[in-house]
Amino acid sequence: AGNDTGGGGVLNDDAGRAAEEREGLKDLPDNHFVWDHAANALGNLCTTLTLVLSVEKIVLGGGVMNRAGLLEKIRSCTRELLNGYLDLPQVTTDAGLREFIGPSVWSEASGGVGAGLVGALVLAQTAYEENRNI
């Protein structure tokens, strides 16, 4: 059945294919067209957040943000999409955009150790603290 969630079912097969496709992204060159599509999608997100919520800063994280040049493409796309609608230095200048749309402090792109590693350490610490009194 289409909703089968048991071992080897349709949903598990789809999840497996999606994981394989994500894994394949790491082998794509920086100039592959998929990064332009990703930058466009994330640039649209940043534009929407800016216009609808009037955010002060947008922080992007996750492994895909470690891709060289992607953050600059996102900033450029955001500026292009806003098309001067907001006359603010945060979205009209390179320096403003670097401050306005940036990587997470946890990301490897900004010199951090990666959120995945930090999360794993927090889980390990929590498990240790919960089990040390047993």
Image (cartoon, grey):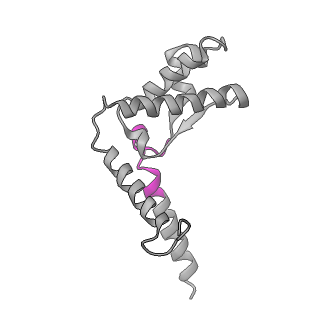
- Residue 2: in magenta span: no
**Which region shows up in magenta?**
105-118
Which residue shows up at 49% across the image and 28% down it?
Answer: 40
The structure residue drawn at horizontal position 34% and vertical position 51%, both measured from the top left corner, is 23
* Residue 70 pos. (x, y %): 41, 31
Left or right: 34 as drawn, with respect to 131: left
| Residue 49, quarter of the rendered image | top right
- Does 47 appear above or below 110? above
Give percent across and percent down for residue 85. Answer: 66, 13
Q: Residue at x 46, y 70 (%)?
A: 9
Residue toward you, 94 or 5: 5
Q: Is residue 108 part of the magenta span, yes or no?
A: yes
Q: With respect to residue 24, does 5 lie above or below?
A: below
Q: Looking at the rendering, which quadrant does residue 101 occupy?
A: top right
Left/right placement of residue 1 relative to residue 36 reads right
Q: What is the total number of numbered labels drawn onto the structure image? A: 0
| Quadrant (top left/top right/bottom left/bottom right) for the C terminus | bottom right
Q: How far across and down, in percent of the image, does residue 41 sit?
A: 52, 32
Residue 27, image x, y percentages: 27, 43
Asked whether 80 or 104 is in front, the reply is 80
> Which residue is the extreme one toward the bottom?
134
